[in-house]
Amino acid sequence: MTAVDPFPRSARYDPAWLEQCRMGPNVLWLCEALCSKLTLRPGMRVLDLGCGRAASSIFLAREYGLRVFANDLWISPTENLARIVDAGLEAEITPIRAEAHELPYAHGYFDVIVSLDAYHYFGTDDLYLKSVLRFLRPGGEIGIVCPGVARELTPDQVPAHLRDLWRADWHTFHSAQWWGLHWAKTELVDVTNAEALPDSHAIWQEFAGHTTEAERAAIQADRGEFLTFARTVATRR
Ligand SMILES: C[S@@+](CC[C@H](N)C(=O)[O-])C[C@H]1O[C@@H](n2cnc3c(N)ncnc32)[C@H](O)[C@@H]1O
């Protein structure tokens, strides 16, 4: 991490609590990095799509005074409700189980849609953005952070240290430029940010301490050369 902590809000959260919520890289860091590029006002309605154990939903409600819908598929809303109640945020956060293609919300309901370490599971499909934008009001923002790569890799360019994981499912990792174009070409949004997080390498390194042996080896061998976190933000036209 750089000399000045780039994630001062996240630093206030109990690491043991975050460990209980962990499903991948430090989601508070991803969320704080995303929020720095969003225009957030207290009371805005936010969809946290693929919220996992709802750590980011709690962060969004507590830090920015947002009204959050904590939407996930694998983690039950009953489990997430317990965490939300513990945080004293049951009036601010609604836990929901819904598949990303079957969202149960009114069209135009959200001011902001965020997705952290989740959108690449369902959003690489060219038609997905149009589908999810129905739930965002015109002028609202959508922002995602996904594990990514510094540049797009053809199959023969995948470095040896990433090859096995790539075959498994890391081929869903794309560059920030790829995501920016993926959204811009729809002409449904104006892309306002598409870049690799400046602290990508530090975030991967922290994750290396919490993952499988194969992933740890790949992250260490990579040394920040290919692996990034791609942040993409756009405004619905
Ligand atoms: C790697 S976890 C990340 C969870 C959380 N955002 C975090 O960073 O801790 C990916 C999440 O995406 C959600 N997800 C994957 N596919 C989904 C789908 N088709 N619809 C809704 N959520 C989905 C899963 O339920 C899972 O919790």
Image: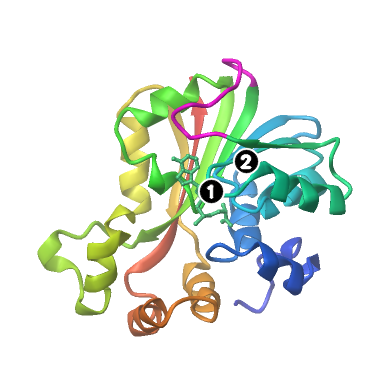
Q: Image point 29% across, 69% down: which residue?
A: 165
Q: Image point 59% across, 49% down: which residue?
A: 75
The residue that label 2 is drawn on is: 38
Q: Name the kind of residue labelled 2 in the image.
A: Leu
Residue lying at the far left of the rendered structure: 156
Instruction: Please give left or right for residue 184 compared with residue 32 in the image.
Output: left
Q: Image point 59% across, 25% down: which residue?
A: 140
Mark seen at residue 121 = none
Figure quadrant of residue 95: top right
Instruction: Please give left or right for residue 79 compared with residue 154 in the image.
Output: right
Label whose residue precedes the other's in the sequence (1 or 2): 2
Q: Image point 24% across, 72% down: which residue?
A: 164
Residue lying at the far right of the rendered structure: 88
* Neighbour tally class for label 1: few under 14, some 14-19, many 20 plus, Cα within 10 Å: few
Q: Magenta span covers which residues?
A: 98-109
The residue that label 1 is drawn on is: 74
Whether residue 90 is situated above or below residue 196 in the rendered picture: above
Residue 224 percent across, percent down from the top left: 39, 75
Q: Name the kind of residue labelled 1 in the image.
A: Trp
Q: Secondary structure at mark 1?
A: loop
Q: Nearer the viewer, residue 236 or 129?
A: 129
Q: Is residue 201 visible?
A: yes
Q: Secondary structure at mark 2?
A: loop
Q: Nearer the viewer, residue 59 or 141?
A: 59
Q: Nearer the viewer, residue 54 or 160?
A: 54
Q: Is mark 1 within 8 Å of ligand 1?
A: yes
Residue 191 percent across, percent down from the top left: 44, 35
- Residue 115 is inside the magenta segment: no
Q: CA distance from mark 1 to mark 2?
A: 27 Å
Residue 30 percent across, percent down from the top left: 58, 57
